[in-house]
Structure formats: C-alpha cells, structure tokens
Amino acid sequence: MKPIELIRKYNVPGPRYTSYPTVPFWKENAIKASDWLASLENEQAFNPQSTLGLYVHLPYCESLCTFCGCHKRITKNHAVELPYVESVLQEWALYQPTLQPDTEIVELHLGGGTPTFFSPETLTKLIEGIFQLKNINREKCDLSFEAHPNSTTHTQLETLYKLGFRRVSFGIQDYNPVVQKAINRIQTFEQVQLVHQIAKEIGYTSINHDLVYGLPFQDLSGFQMTIEKTIALKPERIALYGYAHVPWVKGTGQRGYDENNLPKDAHKRELYEMAYELLLNAGYIAIGMDHFALPGDTLEVAFQKKELHRNFMGYTHRQTDVMIGLGMSAISDTWRAFAQNEKSVEAYQEQISKGELAIFRGHFLNNEELLIRRHILDLMCHFETQWHSELLKEGFYQQIQERLAPLAKDGLIEIDTTHLRITNTGFAFVRNVCMAFDLDLHGHHFDKPIFSATI
Ligand code: SF4
C-alpha cells in the first residue's frame, strides 16, 4: 500500500496513550480520597524502596493561545499566585502521613499553564515548602519546569537554578508570524534566543524546545524555517508534537481558525517527515513517537538502554514507582491506580481548604488492564512488546490478534510467537497499533467526539 493510502486508512480518532486505560474511561466519583490513599500506602508497603515523582500543575497564563488543550486559567491578576501555592502546599501536607519516611523524591516537574507566570518569590515559597516536608537530595533529584519565553525573566531562571532546577522546557510551537497570529502566540526568534542563552549561561544542562506540527496555516517552507532556527540554538531536546484538534473539548479555545486552515492527512505528515529529516541530519536522535535528543542527553541515554518511560508529561528518562500530581487537574499514578484532581481552580481550592484531597475521578486497574498497560507502554517507548498471552482472559488475546492482522498485512508490524515489532513503515502508526490492544475502545460508542486524529 502506498504511504498516502496508509494515511487515509489509519488516520482515525484515537488516544495518545499517556495512560491506559485512557482518561475518558475513568469514572467520576469512582475513587474516594480514602481509597486512593490506601492504594498509595499499599504500593509503598509492597515496595518500601519506591521512588516518588512529583508533578505540580500551575494553571495560570496571561493570555490564551488558541491551539492549547491544557487545563489553564487566563488572568493578568497576579494576586492569585500566593493563595494557589498555599493550596498546593496544603495538599502536599495531606499526603505526608501516608508517605513512607524513606520515600525519596527523584523527580519534580512544574507544568501548566505557565509556571513562569509566578514570581521568583512565589516559586521559592512553593519549592522550599515542598522540600520542607520531605527530605530531598537536590543533586540526585531531577528538577524541571515549563517556561513561556515571553514571560521568563533572568531572575526566575536564576532563582529556579539556585533551587536545584537544571532542566527547562520552552514552548516555541512555530516561528512563522502567520501561524503565530492564528494561534495568538506572538514570540520572535530573538526573544527565544535571548532567554535560551540566559538559561545556558546560568548553567541549565538540558534545554527543551516544544514545537507543534499541524497548526493552522503551517506550510513546508515556514515550518522548515522554524526547524532550522531551532537547530541553530541546539537545545538538548526537542519535542515535536502533532497538533490535536479537539475544539469540542470544553476550555480549549480552539475556535480562532477554521478546520480548513489546518494541514491535514498527508500534508500534515509531510511536515513531520521534513522536520524529522532535518533534525536527524543535524545530529539529533529520534526517541519514541515525537521526541528528539542530542547524543549524551539523559533521554537519549535512556532510549539506547531501553529504559525510556512515558507518563502524563510525555517521555522521561526516569521511571518512578509513584507519581503524585499536586494542583488543579493534576493526575497521580501508582501504576495500579490513577487519580485526578478537580479541574477548576475554585473546586480544587475549596476541597483542599476543607482538609481533604480534591480527587474527582480515577481508576483502579485490574489484572488485564495492568497487562495491556505494559504492552502499550512498551510499544510507545520501544516500538516492540513481548507476548504474555497466558495472562490474558480467554478471548481477549484472540480479539487483539484479530485486530492486529490487518496492520501486519499492511506491513506496519511483524508478529512472531514471542514478540510484536513495529516496522519502519509502522512508526507513524504507533497509536493505531496500541489501539488494537485497547480493551475499552472497541465496541464502545461515545455520544460526542473524544479523541484527535492519530496522524
Ligand atoms: S499554550 Fe501554554 S501559555 Fe498558551 S494558553 Fe496553553 S498553557 Fe497557557
């Protein structure tokens, strides 16, 4: 089958698999805070040496980028900073009685929203407050944050560096002014260059640039310029995400342009492939579905050693046993259970002020789901998986094989008695391969669209 025919056939709505089961299949009120804490306690009793990752969601942004699918709150009122951080620290305090004294925080990530919306003083209060309650070896812990080039100051970068942060991720998306206008995110190359250089001079050892393909009005020459400018700054990591067009999802604000302005199907894929060639020629190594890293970066080393992991933030070189998400909409994960916080700032803060965790939905995984989760993670991180068919309930394995058969026939995967491997042709269709394993997706009817297209 020609590449264009494969794209037409397989470009269907599907999950991104940052979790399995995927979030739309978790039930509201299915998990109480007490159950969640019990699950966390069990996980640590089961594995006393368990390592802990922390994610802190900082939701505020000064203006709305119209391509954004994150949980955010737009405001120019910085008086919201302190009460929000106080809620996060209260939430963290609620976790302390459940956490083992020896549990080590090995990873801390500030995401958003825009973490650099917050002043250096408020960020210091947040980080010192977190570490006050739990000992941490700042040399060993991986601290990172997301930054908006327009709102990142020298003082913020210096403050976070002194607090132990060594990795920063800048949201770039595209340098073409036409695209920037359409997505309401105007930032020049010179602004990015300046903030990138300041971060380097201060001593940050890993800088990531986030780019997005498939945005409105993107074309090959404009996006080539974006990739070339990015390469000129040589960030250690580049994330090249496909734009997920989901205007039906509440709060995305993806209404500033028309569907017809979006590059689609083969055209969208061409943008990715052009970028892929340029990045590889510049010495980057392709990692997973949408990440690139320079040789020697921790992500690249983990990829080569087959130690890559994927969580709600994307690919990571660290696999933590427990991930606790703090803040509005943040997700926590013990491998056997997920829990998500309330998605509005008010509901989150109200619950925390009562001295209760603000969990509104989640999921406990059964044995089949744990097995499928492992398969999907292996496919996403290593492009192969090993069969454990004897562990699946009768019938499930056969259903998966039946769904995989057309993909094998089209040359996207190779299957033998022990393994499934995704072929070079199949790299673009990893999400489709994972969908064949998804026990929830098939036979389920949604009343409204849920997922973005896979290509
Ligand atoms: S892309 Fe980032 S800065 Fe823009 S609205 Fe979304 S979270 Fe805020």
Image (spheres, helix red, strand yellow):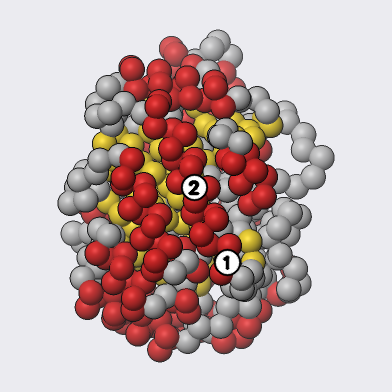
Residue 165's disc number: none
| Ligand 1 within 8 Å of the CB at mark 1 | no
What residue sits 31% from the left and 45% below the top? 132
- Disc number placed over residue 88 in the picture, else none: 2
How many numbered markers are drawn? Answer: 2
Q: Could you tell me if the residues under marks 2 and 1 are in contact, i.e. CB atoms within 8 Å? A: no
At which x and y percent is residue 152? 42, 75
Asked whether residue 303 is in view, the answer is: no
Q: Amino acid at mark 2?
A: Val
Q: SS class of the residue under badge 1?
A: helix
For marks 2 and 1 on the same chain, the one whose residue lies earlier in the sequence: 1
Q: Distance of mark 2 from mark 1, alpha carbons?
A: 16 Å
Check disc 1 and report the residue beneath it: 79
| Image-based side of 24 in relation to 397, left or right | right
Say which quarter of the image contains residue 265: bottom right
Secondary structure at numbered mark 2: helix
- Quarter of the image holding residue 396? top right
Residue 263 to residue 105: above or below: below
Is residue 105 in sight in this rendering? Answer: yes
> Which residue does the image show at 33% across and 40% down from the upper left?
133
Q: Where is 281 relative to 265, above or below?
A: below
Q: For this rendering, which residue is in front, 335 or 211?
A: 335
**Residue 90: image x %, image y %?**
48, 42
